[in-house]
Amino acid sequence: MQTIALIAHDKKKDEMLDFVGHHKDLLQHFHLIATRTTGTLINENYQLDVETMMSGPLGGDQQIGARVATEQVDYVIFLRDPLTSQPHEPDINALLRLCDVHDIPLATNRKSAHILLQYADKKLQG
């Protein structure tokens, strides 16, 4: 089963929930991992059995990055807040760099996330 990582900055949590609700039928066919708060919110709202890592600032971005580096993640959706400074910006940049190094499709906004899921769906259908 392919794995999708879901990450959202605090100001993007509601947007992520709306996005997941819109794509719930497709997402249930993937193994989902997420940083702690994002994954907990998704589990509470949609019961998709998301595996949660640590919170992003506490190392969750790095945990997902480790899975990217070991080829355990197929896609990353990271709804970033580009207007708010993040105290763990180096961790975020490291995750984005790992996606590039390991050729993992990465969406950082809602429209690119929709496109990524369209692609993932086509790959799923074979």
Image: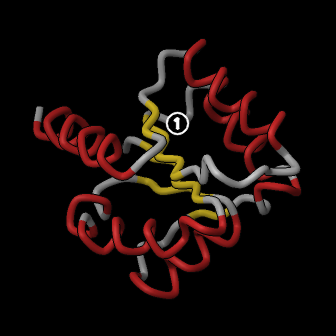
Q: Position of residue 37 (x, y in %)?
A: 67, 72
Q: Is residue 59 left or right of residue 64?
A: right
Residue name at image x 39 percent, y 82 percent = 46
Q: Which residue is located at x 65 percent, y 35 percent? A: 67
Q: Position of residue 94 (x, y in %)?
A: 75, 28
In the depicted structure, whether residue 48 falls above or below residue 91? below
- Pointer 1 local density, CA inside 10 Å: few below 14, some 14–19, many at least 20: many
Residue at 66% x, 24% y is 69
Instruction: Using the image, determine if residue 115 lies above or below residue 70.
Output: below
Q: State the residue lying farthest toward the front.
A: 83
In this picture, residue 87 sits left or right of residue 8: right
The answer to which of 37 and 3 lies nearer the viewer is 37
Residue at left 18%, top 42%? 118
Residue 21 location (% of width, % of height): 30, 74
Q: Which residue is mark 1?
A: 73
Tell me the quarter of the image containing the C terminus: top left
Q: What amino acid is at disc 1? A: Val
Above or below: residue 71 compared with residue 32: above
Q: Who is closer to the viewer here, 63 or 16?
A: 16
Left or right, 90 with respect to 95, comes to right
Q: Quadrant of the N terminus?
A: top left
Tell me which colouring the rendered structure shows. Answer: secondary structure
Circle 1 SS class: loop
Which quadrant would residue 71 be assigned to in this image? top right
